[in-house]
Image: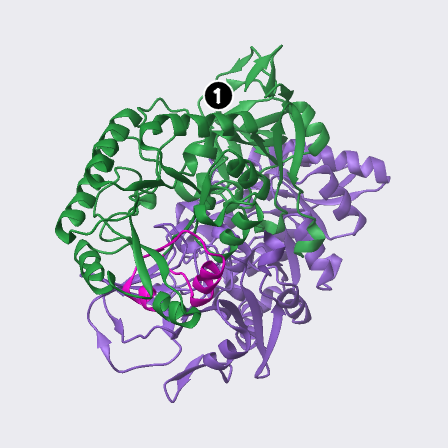
Chain colours: A green, B purple
Amino acid sequence: MHYINKKLLINKVSVNKIVKQIGTPSYVYSYNLLRENILKFKKNFKKINPLICFAVKANNNIKILNEISRLGLGADVVSMGELMAALKAKIDPKKIVFSGVGKTYEEIMFAVKKKILLINAESKSEIEVILKVAKKFNTRINIGLRLNPNVDALTIKEITTGKQINKFGLSDNEVIEFIKLYKNSKLVSIKCLSVHIGSQITSHIPYLKMLNAIQKIINKSNYSFEYIDLGGGMGINYGKNIKLLNYKKYADQILKFITKNNAKIIFEPGRSIVGNAGFLVSKIIYIKKTKKVNFIILDAGMNDLMRPALYKAYHRIIPAVKSRIKIFKRHDFVGPVCETTDKFLSVKSYQKLNEGDNVIICDVGAYGKVLSSNYNLRSKASEILIKNSKILRIKKKENLKTII
Amino acid sequence: MHYINKKLLINKVSVNKIVKQIGTPSYVYSYNLLRENILKFKKNFKKINPLICFAVKANNNIKILNEISRLGLGADVVSMGELMAALKAKIDPKKIVFSGVGKTYEEIMFAVKKKILLINAESKSEIEVILKVAKKFNTRINIGLRLNPNVDALTIKEITTGKQINKFGLSDNEVIEFIKLYKNSKLVSIKCLSVHIGSQITSHIPYLKMLNAIQKIINKSNYSFEYIDLGGGMGINYGKNIKLLNYKKYADQILKFITKNNAKIIFEPGRSIVGNAGFLVSKIIYIKKTKKVNFIILDAGMNDLMRPALYKAYHRIIPAVKSRIKIFKRHDFVGPVCETTDKFLSVKSYQKLNEGDNVIICDVGAYGKVLSSNYNLRSKASEILIKNSKILRIKKKENLKTII
């Protein structure tokens, strides 16, 4: 993504050309960035040779999942819908793990039928349902036990998952108890110990604490897991100059860990694979100048992108065409939805903009489209993939008539 | 809604019967409560004889809108989708007003073609677009001017709309300027002065300030508006013992106002019409007992009901079957979505519950279903209307295959 002659290009295609063809608001994904992220991720953990299961909850577009699959990744799914999507995208069932605190009997049955790699169990009740399914199918189901390591991920509260007060996972005592209970079971085979401490993590320290918690379980239980699922959570740079995760320190520690414990590592990254590869392209409907603020009213709303309203998330907004003229006044980029939370960004100054101009909300590839709704009876945006300088429409804009 | 023989009934129909027929999660609406709310609203403002335009953004189910229409109400819409829904529900176009900061050219064209009562304009740019449409159709378009009265609604920040720092409405100077500019225009006819200061308002004081702000405009401009649109925002009781809006004081003041100014009042209530008439019925998938917390894992998630995650909104949760046994331990009611924000309620104690039991999340008729999404690739819930003790399915549960 860069400017040539003041015009913004995504993989050599100008944003204004995309808008002409597809309209706004549209989610635009860069294949190059997606591929680059995956290659980087693999390189960072090369010595570990992990199974990388993309967290489908971050982005469930079938074409995106299919590209991710072609680049060698599996999938981490959290519902029957996500499992169906992963299979439709031709992801190998043997590379699919099923996580989540509320898997129903029907979902577990479906997963077992599809012969996926692992079901990561999160409660005693869930294990009992898995046993029921195993009896019904007269089979032995491969499971993981999800440990809640009670580690603070040092990320924002809303996306912390590995504290005791969160709904996720089992306590260390429970894990040890269940290993004893089920290690010789004919209905389940405990293949994996799984953890996930949160999202958008930018320090390796919580991860090291997490590894320690896992090591303790292994030592205490004297059980050898075939897989250790370390979850995902690797933070990305949303454009505020933050220090990012030190992958090397994390990888080194994991290498020590697997050398000692002889287990295959599973990762479940989402944001770090697809976050910066997605852009929300939007047109300025009106510019409303008040005394203190210029309101830039976009045709994308909170129904298209929930993260700012839901998590107060920061997303850079850049113009499709650059100008040298700068306006030193507060600019609020807002949507057309009838709600004060429908606001994307507030900045102290911005380049000169005109009604009808296009702008790009950055880093929305993860937790963007998947969280969109029909609030204010607005149809969901289209999705486009830029690959080999071609504009591929990978999801049509919803037809209003189908949602009314 | 009450218990008979420990079983919860909604308009004489037991919740467990509804679940048997329709499944969970489901939005259930009570026709009786809807009707009661409308009659109460009318009674509260009887002497004023207002035009009541239901705020479709609160609930856009066609059948609900149709029932509201049969009870005499019009509609306040904020998008082409909502206008289409209102028309489909047979709401009289002459009772429809169109609000919102980002109406596009296409939306304004559509509204003009459908001959709705009013377009409430919110910016100079929007008025210019309205003029363009009027020229194209060679007609005179009835508009309202939305004033931003810079009044604090004393409600939560996220749903305040009438402060200068919000994106909504025009300043008093702008309103006066536009009256001068357009009062003799052949393209627009200024019929209405419109205000809306926020949502879930429980004190009449901000409303009185708002009336003062309007009176000032009228005095300064010496213009007589046919309509004064006071918006909605009347708060409801979400079950925390709060003081509610004193309707009498508000109505008395409005009566004085219209006696003086001879205008027809428009209201745009949403929450107060439908909020307490909607219930989200959900089944307990698992009960996960940890040291400090019993996690009650429901089959409804934040994708079904966003308000707790988005606004930290409080919604009571009541059991479908009452028990006398009380458990004195913290209970967290959470959904199955893989996210810490997917939590509805935390209470210090609760009656004994079992896996498979049904519970009801209360007061979700407004801003419930309309904000729902397919997050975690979960299909949107069905909607049911209870009318004359009959279970009417007014929206089918989404088929997973259609969203993948």
Seen from the viewer's position, the closer of residues A189 and A108 is A189
Residue B290: x percent and y percent?
22, 61
Q: How many marks?
A: 1
Residue A315 visible within the image: yes
Which region of the structure is painted magenta? A101-128
Quarter of the image with the N terminus of chain B in it: bottom left
Q: Does the stretch in magenta take in A112?
A: yes
Amino acid type at circle 1 is Lys
**What chain is tagged by disc 1?**
A
Is residue A279 toward the left or the right of residue A135 in the image?
Answer: right
- Furthest residue toward right: B138
Q: Quadrant of residue B34?
A: bottom right
Residue B62 on image: x %, y %: 66, 64
- At mark 1, the secondary structure is loop
* Residue B321 locus on image (x, y percent): 37, 81
Residue at image position (37%, 52%) is B312
Give left or right: position of B351 versus B8: left
Indicate the quadrant where residue B64 lies: bottom right
Q: Residue placed at 69% from the left, 55% from the top?
A: A402
Mark 1, residue position:
A329
From the viewer's perspective, tell me whether residue B285 is left or right of residue A300: left
Q: Residue at x 24, y 80 (%)?
A: B325
Q: Nearer the viewer, residue B312 or A11?
A: A11
Residue that sits furthest to the left in the current view: A220
A122 or B217, which lies in front?
Answer: A122
Judge whether A137 appears above or below A2 on screen: below
Mark 1 closeness class: few <14, some 14–19, many ≥20 residues within 10 Å: some
Q: Nearer the viewer, residue A352 or A89?
A: A89
Q: Position of residue A21 (x, y in %)?
A: 72, 30
The residue shown at (53%, 46%) is: A372
Residue A65 forms part of the magenta stretch: no
Q: Residue furthest bottom?
A: B5
